[in-house]
Image (cartoon, rainbow, N blue to C red):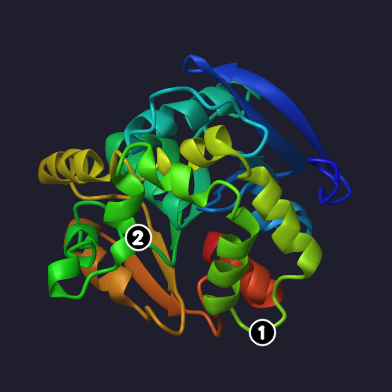
């Protein structure tokens, strides 16, 4: 199975050296730049169903975050503000200047949010898709003693998660994807592709490293937001389960926040690509 067998027509992949690592990025379309940042446990493949519709009026830039997909897996550098510098370097290499729109899902939304907080001049519009944000409620959701979600703390533990998940990647990802999405969203081929992208201890480590910086990410975000609110328009997209919780958490820290609720589970762009494309294009227009 090729690493880019999913790539829509009109898109091409390349590798770009940036910020002391090497990242894989797909690019296609024409018009103002729109950056799409995937979550965990996914890769740039997560956007395949919406890339053609968005590329009709945007130059769509779709990287594999460091530690995932066809990008390198360095030992460190997974702080969300540092990953924002990864993406800034990609845009410089592609000669895409001026403020850009950015959409992030899950972990990718944490990178997008940190980017907007650290470098608001870079971002024309910000879209955050079904994610808790470090510093703005994530820490409470991580507190298992008060009913929080177990996986955050477990994934942050060094070495242990990759040791236990190795050899069980497909089982775990199948259970995760099917439990958090509408039925029949992901084919067997999709599930195998995602599992292969994280198969083996080193690939698993690259994914879990995104979790191991979350507490520091929260402290950094709070410090940045104490200096200024986000000035750009922000659209948060929640699922049927999360609703407008992200919009509510962000409202005190941004000048213009809109909240939308998708008719989907967690994987909005894959579960209802038509709804997602229309919603994003309308917001960016």
Q: Secondary structure at mark 1?
A: loop
Q: Does residue 157 sit above or below 262 in this rendering? A: above
From the viewer's perspective, tell me whether residue 271 is left or right of residue 108: right
In the rendering, at what x and y percent does residue 118 appear?
Answer: 29, 35
Camera sees residue 157: yes
Residue 94 location in percent, x, y?
66, 25
Residue for point 42% across, 65% down: 235
Q: Earlier in the sequence, mark 2 or mark 1?
A: 2
Q: Which residue position holds label 1? A: 183
Image coordinates of residue 172 in percent, x first then y, are 55, 62
For the residues labelled 2 and 1, the Cα–Cα distance comes to: 23 Å
Residue at image coords 89%, 49%: 9
Q: Which residue is mark 2?
A: 151
Against 74, residue 122 (above or below) is below
Q: Residues within 10 Å of mark 2 (few under 14, many from 20)?
A: few
Q: Disc 2 on helix, strand or loop?
A: helix
- Dividing the picture into quarters, in which one does residue 95 lie? top right
Compared across the picture, whether 112 is left or right of 89 comes to left
Q: Quadrant of residue 79?
A: top left
Q: Position of residue 18 (x, y in %)?
A: 54, 18
């Amino acid at each position: 199975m090729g690493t880019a067998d999913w790539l829509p027509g009109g898109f091409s992949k390349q590798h770009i050296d940036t910020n002391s690592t090497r990242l894989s990025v797909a690019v296609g379309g024409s018009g103002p730049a729109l950056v799409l940042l995937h979550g965990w446990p996914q890769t740039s493949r997560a956007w395949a169903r919406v890339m053609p519709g968005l590329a009709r009026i945007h130059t769509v830039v779709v990287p594999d975050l460091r530690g995932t997909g066809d990008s390198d897996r360095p030992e460190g550098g997974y702080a969300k503000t540092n990953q924002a510098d990864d993406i800034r370097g990609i845009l410089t290499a592609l000669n895409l200047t001026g403020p850009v729109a950015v959409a992030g899902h899950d972990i990718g939304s944490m990178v997008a949010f940190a980017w907007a907080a650290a470098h608001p001049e870079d971002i024309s519009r910000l879209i955050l898709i079904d994610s808790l944000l470090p510093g703005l409620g994530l820490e409470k959701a991580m507190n298992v003693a008060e009913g929080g979600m177990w996986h955050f703390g477990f994934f942050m533990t060094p070495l242990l998660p990759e040791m236990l998940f190795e050899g069980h990647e497909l089982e775990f990802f199948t259970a995760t994807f099917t439990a958090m999405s509408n039925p029949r969203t992901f084919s067997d081929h999709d599930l195998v592709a995602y599992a292969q992208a994280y198969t083996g201890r080193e690939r698993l480590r690259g994914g879990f490293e995104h979790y191991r910086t979350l507490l520091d990410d929260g402290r950094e975000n709070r410090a940045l937001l104490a200096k200024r609110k986000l000035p750009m328009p922000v659209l948060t997209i929640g699922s049927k389960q999360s609703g407008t919780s992200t919009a509510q958490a962000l409202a005190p820290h941004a000048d213009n926040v809109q909240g939308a609720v998708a008719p989907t589970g967690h994987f909005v762009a894959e579960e209802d690509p038509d709804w997602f494309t229309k919603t994003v294009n309308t917001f960016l227009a």
